[in-house]
Amino acid sequence: MTREWPFLALEVVLLGVLLQSNAPEVWFWFIALLVLLTWRSLALRSRLEQRRLRAEGTSAPEQPDQP
């Protein structure tokens, strides 16, 4: 979770900028926030999947190949 703190802070800052911006800027900052959130969620999902596969690989016994 410590790796996520800078990104969470950045997302809060972007949300604050989004709430204070005028009409043309709103769309730009909204898209920037969506891109950041999507990127971080995909990275988190990838890390969780790697951890799950690593845990399954170490706990599963070796199966002999059948011809």
Image (cartoon, grey):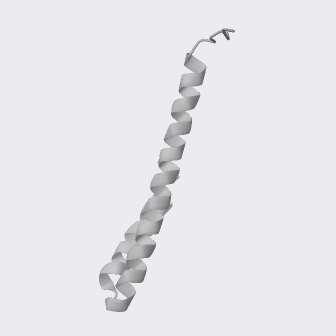
Residue 50, percent from left and from top: 56, 37
Residue in view at x 59 percent, y 23 percent? 57
Residue 4 visible in this rendered orientation of the protein: no
Location of residue 18 by image quarter = bottom left
Residue in view at x 38 percent, y 76 percent? 30
Residue in view at x 55 percent, y 17 percent? 59
Q: Quadrant of the C terminus?
A: top right
Residue 44, percent from left and from top: 49, 48
- Is 24 placed above or below 44 here? below
- Is 12 placed above or below 17 here? above
Location of residue 53 by image quarter = top right
- Is 65 placed above or below 28 here? above
- Is 30 placed above or below 9 here? below
Closer-to-camera residue (63/66):
66
Residue 66, percent from left and from top: 66, 8
Residue 11 visible in this rendered orientation of the protein: yes
Residue 51, percent from left and from top: 54, 34
Residue in view at x 30 percent, y 80 percent? 19
The number of numbered discs placed on residues in the rendered structure image is: 0
